[in-house]
Image (cartoon, rainbow, N blue to C red):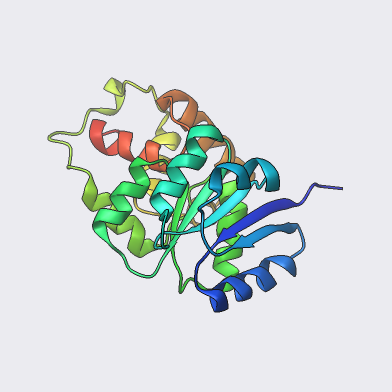
Amino acid sequence: METPTRVLIYEDNPDLRISLSQLLGGTPGLELAGALGNCQQVDTDIPRLKPDVVLMDIDMPGINGIEGLKRIKAKNPSTSVVMLTVFEDNDRVFQAVCAGADGYLLKKTPPAKLLDAINEVKAGGAPMTPAIARQVLRLFPKPVAPRQQEDSPANLSAREQEILGLLVEGYSYKMIAHDRGISLDTVRSHIKKIYEKLHVRSMTEAVSKALRQGLT
């Protein structure tokens, strides 16, 4: 039997914290590791609760979500952190991406999509709502001149370049599979190879590198 994915919530709004807890607690394959109103004790929370995925409110009193994210990644880099926010704030998005966020979602994301996002980040993806993905793209300068395919320093195949291009456009794994008529496992296999060739560990890093180097 597959081990459930342990999810820890940091959310200072009690109503949202309760609704997220109920959603996660009632979903097969997921296990609620905890639901906390702040991340003041984040340095001890993570080793104590051992989450696979953290849902992190970006705006909390005391230690905010960005600082909490930094602390988690400093000591537990393999723990996936998905930021939750009310607004599409350029500065906050940029800070979160630079601090190593594995995903970035609006709090109004429908429950089904939130659950998809947890599964996606656990599988190595970096879920973002389309609106947030567009914000991320605006944060990176356009390359002056895209490199020719044969000159790609990463030596990506034509299919890998296609898939990297779709990641840059904000496509999820499922959307890529549907768009290209391939299985989800095939998408994951291609993305794993892309990460290896680009020497990155997350979609945000892959997108950043692709935009800087004109790889798509």
Q: Position of residue 182 (x, y in %)?
A: 57, 48
Q: Between residue 151 and residue 181, name the one nearer to us.
A: 151
Identify the residue at horizontal 17%, vertical 42% (top origin).
Answer: 142
Identify the residue at horizontal 38%, vertical 22% (top origin).
Answer: 155
Residue 2 is left or right of residue 172, and the answer is right
- Is residue 182 something one can see in this rendering? no
Q: Between residue 90 and residue 124, name the one nearer to us.
A: 90
Name the quarter where the C terminus is drawn.
top left
Q: Position of residue 148 (x, y in %)?
A: 24, 27
Identify the residue at horizontal 40%, vertical 47% (top origin).
Answer: 67
Residue 114 versus residue 133 in the image, above or below? below
Task: Pick out the residue farthest to the right.
Answer: 1
Identify the residue at horizontal 26%, vertical 39% (top origin).
Answer: 211
Task: Pick out the residue farthest to the left.
Answer: 144
Task: Pick out the residue farthest to the bottom.
Answer: 15
Q: Between residue 29 and residue 153, name the one nearer to us.
A: 29
Q: In terms of image quadrants, where is residue 199?
A: top left
Q: In terms of image quadrants, where is residue 55?
A: bottom right
Residue 157 is left or right of residue 124, and the answer is left
Please state the total of marks drawn on the protein image: 0
Residue 51 versus residue 30 in the image, above or below? above
Residue 46 is left or right of residue 88, and the answer is right
Q: Position of residue 84 (x, y in %)?
A: 45, 62
Q: Position of residue 45 (x, y in %)?
A: 62, 48
- Is residue 47 something one can see in this rendering? yes
